Each structure stands twice: as structure tokens, then as C-alpha cells.
Amino acid sequence: MEVEFGRNSEVIYTEVNVDGGKVAYLTLNRPEKKNALSLEMLNALCDAMDEASKPEIRAVVLKGAGNCFSAGHDLREIAEGDETFVRTIFESCYRLMRKIRQIPKPVVAQVHGYAVAAGCQIVAACDMAFASEDAKFSLPGVKIGLFCATPLAIISRVIGRKKAFEMAFTGEIIDAFEAEKIGLINRVVKNHELDSEVRDVVGKLSKFSRSVIEKGKEFFYKQYCMNEFDAILYGIDVIVDMCGEQAAREGISSFLEKRKSK
């Protein structure tokens, strides 16, 4: 299944069967503009995320067409818009961040080439991210008098204060290996192995109980904002609740009986 979102097909939505589970691939499709995030593309991404919310979709992959992931917001569109229009752009990006976080399934960024400013923000917002060796990341707004405030809000919570400050206040590019080192991405792979690496990961995720994945993602982000002991207490509620579900009963039984789970 393939669906185009946006007036000019800014996002291509494709459902792919991976190891018995359906995965939604969302492709940023403005390669001639380095997949710059226009308002139309941001709205299309939000619509595509809604489409991916269907129960049969087990994971979501975000990737870019052409030679990069995304060059960030469309600066020409920002330059030509009034304050109300510019605010609408950033509010649409905020809406996308919320959808990535709240969709009850893993969202994986598949990154090649540049992931800059809001493009880097999307990578950081995803639950997992994998990049090819040619990937580059930066928050260059400071160089053009436009501090990367909204990307920094996400990125500083993913990679740590000192490195996030350095990225935002120098605008310097980091390569994929540095991005892995600081925790912006999970893993670097050879350029020709990126597709298969991501496919392997989402294939593994697709095999697990849908309920466990959904509740696990909700728990992960809620507990992240708690102190550790409140998080443990919340975790008790979650795991006790899951212990009563069929997936856990069957999983525990198969382990104790040394057989494959049904």
C-alpha cells in the first residue's frame, strides 16, 4: 500500500510487511529542496502519522528521499511569511513532535546525508535512530541569526546539556560516529547496509506483543519525567497489570516449559 500526503506528494506513506508485521515507512519527499520542512510537508507528516496509528501497524520508519534526511525548516518560506504564518509553521512542527511521542508504537529514524536543525530535531524525537556513515548532524541556526531554540528543546534532553550547548552555540557539524558516541543515534552502519539494518530492527519489534510495546512506550516516557522512586512505583503498577495479560501468561509458561511461545 502506498499513499501520497500533501499537495505535491511531500510525504510518501508506504506499508511494508516485515517478518510478518506491517511497518509504515514515511518518506520526506522534497529531494530537490533537501527535504526542507515546509508547512505543507509538516502537515502531511502529521496526517501520515495519523494513518500509521492503525492497530495493524507495528512500527513507523521516517526517512528522506534523495541525498539527505532533511535540511530543516524551509527558510525561504519563513523569510517570506508574516509572524502569524511563521508561528503556524513551528506549531505544526510541535504537533509532529507530539505525534511521534504519543503514537503507541516505536518510531525509527533512518538517516543518511544531512539532518540539520529541525531535521536533527526529528531524529532526536524518534524513539530510535540509525544512520549511515555519510550522515551529518548540526544546529546551524546561530550562524544566520536564528537560534535553534525548538530543536534544542528536544536534543538537549537526548544527548546531555554540555554537548547540546556546544552544538547549538557553535553550529558545527558532527558526523555519524560522533552522533552515536553522544547518544543522538543508536548505531552507525555502512551506507549500503542502512536499509537492511532498520528493516532488521523493526522486524524484531514487530514480533513482540502489541500491548507490551504500547504500554512499554507509554511507561518509558512518563517515568522519564519522574524521580527514580516514583518511577519504580509506577513501574510496579504497569508490570502487575501486564502480568494478568495473555501475552505475559503465555510467555512465562513457555519459558518455564522450555518451549517456543505460541
Image: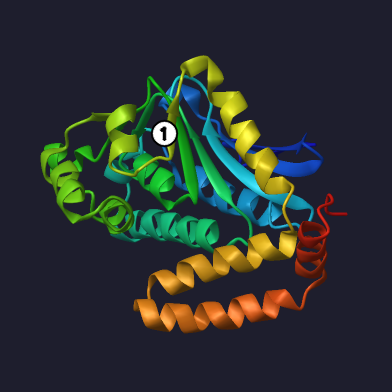
Quadrant of res 198: top right
Using the image, determine if residue 76 lies above or below residue 118: above
Q: Is residue 214 left or right of residue 223?
A: right
Quadrant containing the C terminus is: bottom right
Query: According to the image, label 1 marks what residue?
Result: 70
Q: Is residue 163 left or right of residue 44?
A: left
User: What scheme was used to colour the molecule?
Assistant: rainbow
Q: Measured from the top left, where is residue 196 in percent x and y?
A: 61, 25
Q: Is residue 112 left or right of residue 25?
A: left
State the residue lying farthest toward the right: 262
Q: Residue at x 53, y 77 (%)?
A: 235
Residue 98 visible in the snapshot:
yes
Residue 73 visible in the snapshot:
no
User: Could you say whether the residue bearing mark 1 is in a helix, strand or loop?
Assistant: loop
Q: Measured from the top left, where is residue 228 in percent x and y?
A: 36, 76
Q: Residue at x 34, y 36 (%)?
A: 180
